[in-house]
Image (spheres, rainbow, N blue to C red):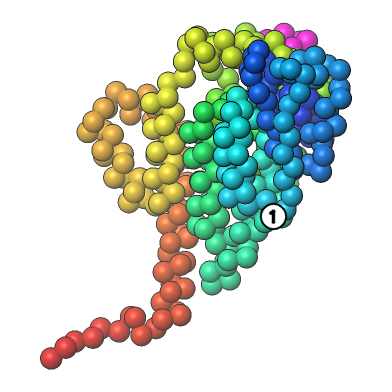
Amino acid sequence: MIGLAGTSGSGKTFSALLMAAGLAGEGGKVGFIDTELGRGAMYADDETIIEAMPEGKYYISDMTAPFTPAKYVKAIKEFISYDVNVLVIDSATHEWEGSGGCQDIAENNKLRGMPNWAMAKMEHKKLMNILTQCPMHIISCLRAREKTKPVKNPDTGKIEMVQEGLQPIQEKNFMFDMTLSMMFDETAPGKPKILKCPKPLNHLFQGESSLVTKVVGEKLKAWSDGGEAIDKVVRNLRREFRDAAAGGNDYLKAIHQRVENEDKSLLREIWTAEFADELKSIAKEADQISLNQDESDQEENPESNKLIINN
């Protein structure tokens, strides 16, 4: 799974198609889910793309609102049935903040006036499950924007907005689940800043002139087919911990105890301070959502709080 995030005009779609062509190889098929009103078709007649693609073509499926996670899942399954080897999703951002996406799901199903993120994240999890389990290579393009956050100035005591740089527009854990992820900027189209990369692939993105090309895709394919493989056990275990954390602290503690009993060495490999903090944050949020929902149920059904004694 590969994540390409960037601003408009940064070259992420063009780069994704070239990479997909290399990953597909001779005789392969490249699919394209287009949520951008025909952006995918813009490159169908581009000489560079035609020359790069197997048999000079790729297969486009247009997607319109509502951009629900279920709609993405259905489209992905259709490409699987069509024996596509590499699928480009442009863009995965719509699933999160587009019309009908996860943010709308949370807002349109409020509990006690609060967004229902438990429902939204459950739907999002279904998409992530198929992305991690499907037989295709997946390249997800994401929009990015400058992010700021309020920070208290220790000298003045006033709240100031601090720039955090470009951030992908998606659920906060999305990029963690990618095998390879990168950020593009319109000031240097096609030249990525690497966010996450397996060590055996670092050499592909070194040097001032490094761009994403078909050759990069071919080398990714060679590595995936016969090179040093990703440790799927570790990756799946991280996913299992995040899923458990989404159920709250009790679930998180239970899986931690199980893994510790089964394989302490494996637990030590993934249990970094950063990962622990991430899980604690997810679990805390899940417990708060559950608490809000319980309070809402009690207010709607006050009779359920009464103790009934049968004599």
Where is the C terminus found, in terms of image quarters? bottom left
Q: Is residue 158 magenta?
A: no
The answer to whether one can see residue 226 in this image is: yes
Circle 1: element type:
loop
Residue at 68% in and 30% down: 31
Which of the 4 image quadrants contains residue 200? top right
Magenta: main secondary structure: loop
* Circle 1 residue: 66
Which of the 4 image quadrants contains residue 137? top right
The answer to whether one can see residue 148 in this image is: no
Residue at 58% in and 50% down: 70
- Foreground pick, 26 / 112: 26
- Foreground pick, 278 / 128: 128
Identify whether 162 is placed above or below 132.
below
Which of the 4 image quadrants contains residue 12? top right
Residue at 73% in and 35% down: 60
- Foreground pick, 274 / 216: 216
Q: Which residues are magenta?
A: 206-210
Identify whether 238 is placed above or below 156.
above
Disc 1 marks a residue whose amino acid type is Pro
Q: State the image coordinates of residue 162 (x, y, percent, origin top left).
A: 72, 42
Residue at 43% in and 74% down: 297
* In-image side of 64 versus 180 (left or right): right
Estimate how packed mark 1 is, as few (under 14), some (14 to 19) or many (20 or more) residues with alpha carbons within 10 Å. some
* In-image side of 94 versus 236 (left or right): right
Where is the N terminus found, in terms of image quarters? top right
Identify whether 160 is placed above or below 115.
above
Q: State the image coordinates of residue 210 (x, y, percent, origin top left).
A: 74, 12
Q: State the image coordinates of residue 262 (x, y, percent, origin top left).
A: 23, 31
Q: Residue furthest bottom?
A: 311
Q: State the image coordinates of residue 294 (x, y, percent, origin top left).
A: 41, 69
